[in-house]
Amino acid sequence: METLKITLKRSYIGRCERHRRILSSLGLRKLNRSVIHDDTPSIRGQINKVSHMVEVTKITK
């Protein structure tokens, strides 16, 4: 199964509340911090909403 490494690259200051909640649900709180999630459709949907703020890398196990 593939996993995704998601890194917050742009600040959420001044962004709409919806984007802030998505980043919080992904576990991203500080700039340049990364989290690892399984590659699921729900995670992909969240990433698409904030794609301009995050960087995604595929990790194969």
Image (tube, helix red, strand yellow):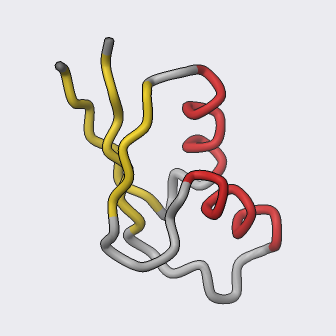
Give whichever of 61, 14 is nearer the camera.
Answer: 61
Q: How many circles with numbers are drawn on the protein? A: 0
Question: Whole-percent x and y of residue 45?
Answer: 64, 33
**Residue at the image point whose x is 66% and y is 48% from the top:** 49
Q: Left or right: where does residue 55 sit relative to residue 30?
A: left
Give whichever of 60, 50 is nearer the camera.
Answer: 60
Question: Whole-percent x and y of residue 3?
Answer: 33, 28
Give whichever of 53, 21 is nearer the camera.
Answer: 21
Question: Whole-percent x and y of residue 39?
Answer: 44, 24
**Residue 60, quarter of the rendered image:** top left
**Residue 57, quarter of the rendered image:** top left
Q: Left or right: where does residue 47 sit relative to residue 42?
A: left
Q: Quadrant of the C terminus?
A: top left
Question: Whole-percent x and y of residue 22?
Answer: 69, 56
In the picture as drawn, the residue positioned furthest to the right comes out as 17
Give whichever of 25, 12 is nearer the camera.
Answer: 25
Q: Quadrant of the N terminus?
A: top left
**Residue at the image point whose x is 63% and y is 88% from the top:** 13
**Residue at the image point whose x is 44% and y is 79% from the top:** 30
In the picture as drawn, the residue positioned furthest to the top comes out as 1
- When the figure is inspected, residue 24 is found, relative to residue 41, above or below; the finding is below
Q: Left or right: where does residue 13 sit relative to residue 32?
A: right
